[in-house]
Image: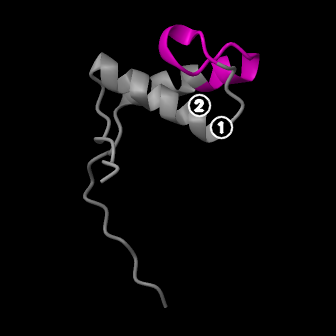
Amino acid sequence: MAAKKKSSGKAKYGRAARKTVGRAMRRKKSGTLKSGRGGKGVTVKSRKQAIAIGLSEARKKGAKVPRRKSSS
């Protein structure tokens, strides 16, 4: 049997982050979500990429979002 993870009781993501990611997902669905600086890039097709953009926007707004994992 696999051991269950204990939750600390604190949410990892805040309500504002959830709203921002939801907004990004709706923009993806309508085809207006773009990648790159200034929204001049390619239209986003990937669900994962849309979530990443939403979390990035939430971070810029100061919402409660865990830090990005460093690539090193």
Tag 2: residue type? Ala
What residue is at 50 percent from the left and 8 percent from the top? 38
Q: Secondary structure at mark 1?
A: helix
Q: Position of residue 49 (x, y in %)?
A: 58, 35
Residue 56: numbered disc: none
Q: Position of residue 61 (x, y in %)?
A: 32, 17
Q: Is residue 63 visible?
A: yes
Q: Residue furthest front?
A: 72
Q: Quadrant of residue 6?
A: bottom left
Q: Quadrant of residue 68?
A: top left
Q: Is residue 22 above or below residue 6?
A: above
Q: Nearer the viewer, residue 19 or 28?
A: 28
Measured in 3D between alpha carbons, the distance from the residue under mark 2 to the one under mark 1, in whole angstroms, is 5 Å
Write down the residue under mark 1. Answer: 47
Q: Quadrant of the C terminus?
A: bottom left
Q: Position of residue 42 (x, y in %)?
A: 67, 20
Using residue 29 as the reference point, say whether residue 8 is left or right of it: left
What residue is at 65 percent from the left and 17 percent from the top? 27
Residue 34 sits inside the magenta stretch: yes
Q: Secondary structure at mark 2?
A: helix
Write down the residue under mark 2. Answer: 50
Using residue 8 as the reference point, say whether residue 47 is left or right of it: right
Residue 37 sits inside the magenta stretch: yes
Q: Quadrant of residue 40?
A: top right
Using residue 43 as the reference point, say whether residue 8 is left or right of it: left
Q: Are marks 2 and 1 in contact (CB under 8 Å)?
A: yes
Chain part drawn in magenta: 25-41
Tag 1: residue type? Arg
What residue is at 62 percent from the left and 26 percent from the top? 25
